[in-house]
């Protein structure tokens, strides 16, 4: 155990150096693969923070994906804002949206909260697909004045992936993080211990909105094209559930492993069309039955192995 | 005199929506004493403790902690003022380690500086928890979980501990042990309010007793001065 601790930072450093030099040595395929991996890992970390740690069952993360993405596209196209700045503003707009949503959905609990978030995402979908300003359902092409190079987009994605990981790590190691985990285990008692439930939950919800919205901005800079029926689709949440559940809910490593597997599978399965969803579903169900705690959760339970321990000793 | 009163509850009314759970409850706890509140299921004992700790807002009435009004304050403000709840059914955080559970006990800011010191004090009181330091709390036995719940409450360095049914579902030998530790805690000058269904044991430990029935206090007095007949009648409402 001590040995793995000793070499942990060396290994993590090595991985980081490898990933940050991909544009130099990697093929386009490797570059795209890593890029998508970072973005999905980032969004999955946020869903995991909400569901796995603070007990906020969000089924409406696509609201922030779409809102962040559209804010970026509108600012870039219509107002000529520098593309990366508009990505950041997209994240901030997502926070505003989350604040507005919280006025309504923070009165609900459990599955009702989940449905509440989903309803908001659907409302946004309908609104954007009937809104002339964003060209209805046709969608928008993201046209920055000077289109960023692929390696620039890659580094933006890398920053989102690594930045999110660090953010989650810092939050979980902090006092708020312990409070969140306690809240997940027993809300009333954590309140009796002095945790301010509403504030902690709202904090998580806003952080998740910020990072999900920003990540979506980077994604749509990469994909160039944004459409309401894709951006606000429940498919996003399904993908995040898949990633977090197979990776291991309530672990920091889970979303990373899950995102890697998901991106890998979705590349392989792309040629099978809709059958691919069936296969993903079968994999998810199999893992839920065989290892309900997901890959990393089961591994940790069996071996005590953690790359980034959120535990205090 | 009021300065020797740790807790003074006056004319407390509590409603759950339209249902009134407490009726005009008044109670006084002298500093450094153990006071027992007994009553059958649903008589309002837990409601009383939850209100004192701030989880519930009283509809009417006042709560004073060492002369300071605390009614209507949420737990994150009552805990730093020195009152902590040991909730019914232990309610430790199952997926946190023993150590993390203890740290949660000192969640409110004022206590954090002295945390390591308080933890070693808690381990001194319950050595078995020290052995389980890194274990997930849900792997502990029932008795150990109850010890953890008490130790967790002690982490906030309370002046008043509210214990809700600490003997629930435990073997008699373990209950005896836990009551011994409670005695030790009390000897350090910490005031204790015991809510129990185990009438005999809690009356033995307490210097003052209240009997509740259907949300009202129906009998009070020193346990030594109360006859078994009186307690029985009050408890069952005969």
Image (spheres, rainbow, N blue to C red):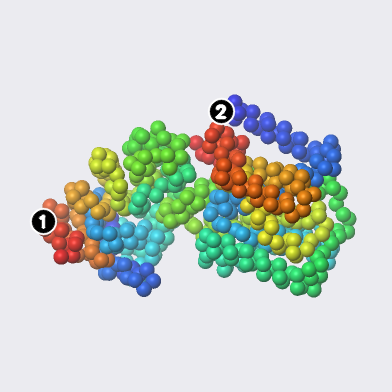
Which mark identifies residue B200? Answer: none
Which mark identifies residue A1? Answer: 2
| SS state under label 1 | loop
Side of A11 where B130 appears, left or right: left
Q: Nearer the viewer, residue B197 or B224?
A: B197
Q: Nearer the viewer, residue B112 or A124?
A: A124
- Residue B119 x %, y %: 40, 39
Picture residue at 33% right of the left edge, 37% below the top? B125
Split into 4 quadrants, where in the image is the C terminus of chain B? bottom left
Which residue is farthest top? A3
- Residue B177 x %, y %: 26, 39
Q: Chain of mark 1?
A: B
Residue placed under numbered mark 1 in the picture: B227
Picture residue at 71% right of the left edge, 63% below the top? A232
Side of A266 where B174 appears, left or right: left
Residue A221: name its quadrant.
bottom right
Q: Nearer the viewer, residue A100 or B106?
A: A100
Picture residue at 65% right of the left edge, 48% below the top? A282
Q: CA distance from mark 2 to mark 1?
A: 62 Å
- Residue A248 x %, y %: 59, 44
């Amino acid at each position: 155990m001590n040995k793995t601790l000793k070499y942990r930072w060396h290994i993590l450093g090595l991985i980081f150096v490898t990933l940050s030099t991909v544009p130099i040595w990697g093929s386009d395929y490797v570059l795209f693969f890593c890029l998508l991996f970072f973005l999905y890992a980032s969004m999955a970390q946020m869903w995991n923070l909400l569901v796995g740690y603070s007990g906020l069952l969000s089924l409406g993360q696509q609201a922030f994906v779409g809102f962040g993405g559209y804010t970026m596209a509108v600012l870039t196209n219509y107002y000529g804002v520098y593309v990366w700045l508009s990505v950041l503003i997209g994240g901030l707009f997502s926070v505003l949206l989350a604040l507005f949503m919280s006025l309504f959905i923070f009165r609900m609990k459990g599955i009702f909260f989940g449905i509440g978030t989903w309803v908001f995402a659907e409302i946004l979908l309908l609104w954007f697909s009937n809104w002339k300003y964003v060209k209805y359902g046709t969608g928008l092409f993201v046209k920055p004045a000077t289109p960023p190079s692929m390696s620039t987009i890659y580094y933006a994605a890398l920053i989102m992936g690594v930045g999110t990981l660090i953010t989650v790590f810092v939050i979980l190691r902090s006092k708020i993080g312990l409070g969140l985990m306690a809240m997940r285990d027993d809300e009333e008692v954590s309140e009796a211990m002095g945790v301010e439930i509403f504030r902690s939950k709202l904090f998580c919800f806003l952080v998740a909105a910020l990072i999900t919205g920003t990540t979506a901005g980077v994604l749509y800079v990469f994909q160039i094209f944004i459409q309401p029926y894709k951006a606000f689709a429940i498919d996003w949440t399904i993908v995040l559930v898949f990633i977090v559940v197979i990776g291991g809910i309530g672990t920091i490593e889970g979303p990373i492993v899950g995102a890697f597997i998901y991106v890998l599978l979705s590349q392989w399965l792309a040629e099978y069309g809709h059958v691919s969803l069936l296969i993903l579903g079968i994999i998810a169900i199999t893992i839920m039955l065989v290892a309900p705690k997901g890959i990393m959760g089961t591994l940790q339970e069996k071996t005590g192995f953690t790359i980034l321990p959120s535990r205090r000793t | 005199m009021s300065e020797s009163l740790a807790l003074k509850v006056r004319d407390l009314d509590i409603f759950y929506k339209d249902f009134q759970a407490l009726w005009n409850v008044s109670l006084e706890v002298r500093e450094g004493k153990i006071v027992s509140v007994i009553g059958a299921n649903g008589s309002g004992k837990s409601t009383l403790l939850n209100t004192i700790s701030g989880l519930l807002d009283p509809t009417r009435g006042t709560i004073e902690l060492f002369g300071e009004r605390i009614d209507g304050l949420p737990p994150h403000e009552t805990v730093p003022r020195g009152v902590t709840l040991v909730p019914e059914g232990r309610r430790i955080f199952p997926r946190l380690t023993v150590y993390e559970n203890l740290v949660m006990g000192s969640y409110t800011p004022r206590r954090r500086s002295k945390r390591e010191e308080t933890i070693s004090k808690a381990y001194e009181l319950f050595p078995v928890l020290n052995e389980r330091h890194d274990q997930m709390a849900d792997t502990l036995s029932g008795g150990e979980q109850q010890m953890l719940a008490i130790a967790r409450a002690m982490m906030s360095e309370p002046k008043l501990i509210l214990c809700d049914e600490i003997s629930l579902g435990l073997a008699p030998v373990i209950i005896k042990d836990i009551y011994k530790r409670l005695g030790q805690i009390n000897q350090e000058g910490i005031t204790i309010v015991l809510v129990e269904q185990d009438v005999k044991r809690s009356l033995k430990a307490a210097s003052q007793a209240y009997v509740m029935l259907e949300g009202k206090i129906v009998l009070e007095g020193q346990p030594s001065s109360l006859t078994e007949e009186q307690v029985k009648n009050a408890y069952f409402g005969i």
